[in-house]
């Protein structure tokens, strides 16, 4: 009965004015450059309204069963000194506006494979449960 309310597992990889969205259940992905840009020279997710609208449009076209998402957001660039608390909050809030009920952040390193992203998502989810 409740199977229709499936949670989508999404891996959102952020580059300067470019996103890659991977559906972790099917392994399908889409990669697009943003116009207008959402990044500035100092901040990757600088214009979060533009970024949210851009990603939301892609998600709605890409995900066949639109519902809540469990999302791993991975910022790949513009990481000097790590993400500030303001940048983290902007990414989390934006993901929630994209219908993510659970949001987990990663910064830097290599882009993950589907299997690695699933494991990371589960690890971060369990870690969050333990700290609550």
Image: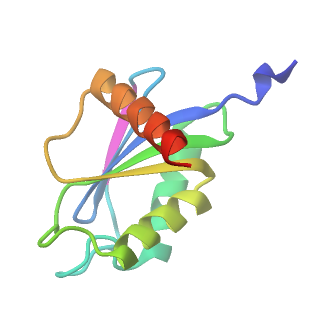
| Residue 107 versus residue 66 in the image, above or below | below
Question: Which residue is painted at 43% across and 27% down in the image?
Answer: 24
Pick the front one: 72 or 36:
72
The stretch of residues the image draws in magenta is: 28-32
Q: Position of residue 69 (x, y in %)?
A: 59, 42
Q: Residue furthest front?
A: 131
Residue 18 lies in quadrant: bottom left
Viewed as shown, does residue 65 lie left or right of 4?
A: left
Residue at the (46%, 56%) spot, across then down: 55
Picture mark count = 0
- Label the magenta part by its dominant secondary structure: strand
Along the viewing direction, whichever of 47 and 79 lies nearer the viewer: 79
Q: Is residue 36 visible?
A: no
- Residue drawn at x 29%, y 75% as measured from the top left: 84
Please state the horizontal and vertical placement of residue 26, each as a whole percent of the image: 46, 20
Q: Is residue 33 visible?
A: yes
Quadrant in the picture for the N terminus: top right
The x, y position of residue 56, in whole percent, is: 54, 56
User: Is 58 placed above or below 85 here?
Assistant: above
Q: Is residue 66 left or right of residue 56?
A: right
Q: Is residue 20 magenta?
A: no
The colour scheme is rainbow
Left or right, residue 96 beside residue 72 = right
Q: In the image, is 132 to the left or to the right of 32?
A: right
Q: Outermost residue toward the right?
A: 1
Residue 32: % across, % down = 32, 51
């Amino acid at each position: 009965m409740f199977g229709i309310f499936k949670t989508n597992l999404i891996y959102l990889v952020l580059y300067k004015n470019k996103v890659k969205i991977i559906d972790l259940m099917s392994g399908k992905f889409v990669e697009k450059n943003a116009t207008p840009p959402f990044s500035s020279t100092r901040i990757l997710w600088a214009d979060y309204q533009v970024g949210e609208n851009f990603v939301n449009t892609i998600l709605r076209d890409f995900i066949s069963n639109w519902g809540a998402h469990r999302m791993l957001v991975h910022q790949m660039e513009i990481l000097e000194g790590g993400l500030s608390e303001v940048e983290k909050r902007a990414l989390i809030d934006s993901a929630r506006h994209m219908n993510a009920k659970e949001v987990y952040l990663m910064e830097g390193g290599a882009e993950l494979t589907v299997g690695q992203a699933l494991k990371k998502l589960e690890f971060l989810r369990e870690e969050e449960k333990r700290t609550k």
